[in-house]
Amino acid sequence: MRSHPDNAAYATRDLAVVWHPCTQMKDHEHLPPVPIRRGMGVWLEDFEGRRYLDAISSWWVNLFGHANPRISAAVAGQAARLEHVLLAGFTHEPVIELSEELVALAPQGLTRCFYADNGSSAVEAALKMSFHYWRNVGRSRKCRFVTLTNSYHGETLGALAVGDVPLYRSVYAPLLMDVITVTSPDCFVREP
């Protein structure tokens, strides 16, 4: 019978080769990462069989759960035909169909879709689009952004700049654009 490595073995291998985002690596000297073997619905399972309720749900699967059969089948079917093609100068039927559906749902006047592959890239694209819009309408001096206290938008430079979590942004402060930070309306985190 073949033995499988346990959580500690995977954590050791991980820490030798991976820098984790949104993580102070020094913390892993005392609290190793939790190696996950698989997910199903709202549950994650480690290599020793322990289950964890995925309250974060990897940020991307929170609506449908892990290993959703319908989504898995659709992804496998699409990957069998075309995994990826750059949208710079190319197109494909699935992106056209999705864009048509999204435009039909969007408010009047929103007639185009722009795609990014992650949250930080989407924030970067939104910042650039906003900046470019104001240039196009002749307001080129309009180039600052407002952010809410304690907000988080990702780890690329633009996303860090419009976020307000010192743990992630303070070391990069010299690289970040100057933003206007206003108090969050969130009653849980605001001053009394």
Image: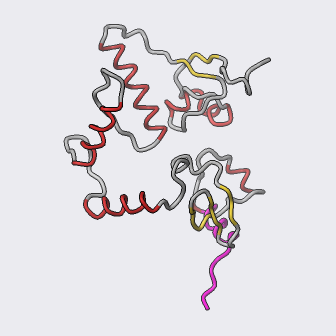
Quarter in which the C terminus is drawn: top right
Q: Is 36 within the magenta?
A: no
Residue 154, quarter of the rendered image? top right
- Magenta stretch prevailing secondary structure: helix
Residue 68 position (above or below residue 102): below
Residue at position x 75%, y 57% in the image: 31
Residue at position x 78%, y 57% in the image: 30
Left or right position of 13 against 8: left
- 40 or 131: which is nearer to us? 40
Q: Please report the bounds of the magenta region as a residue range.
A: 1-16
Residue 133 position (above or below residue 92): above
Q: Residue 38 at x, y = what percent?
A: 57, 66
Residue 15 position (above or below residue 115): below
Residue 185, quarter of the rendered image? top right
Residue at position x 63%, y 36% in the image: 168
- 24 or 93: which is nearer to us? 93
Q: Residue 95 at x, y = what percent?
A: 27, 44
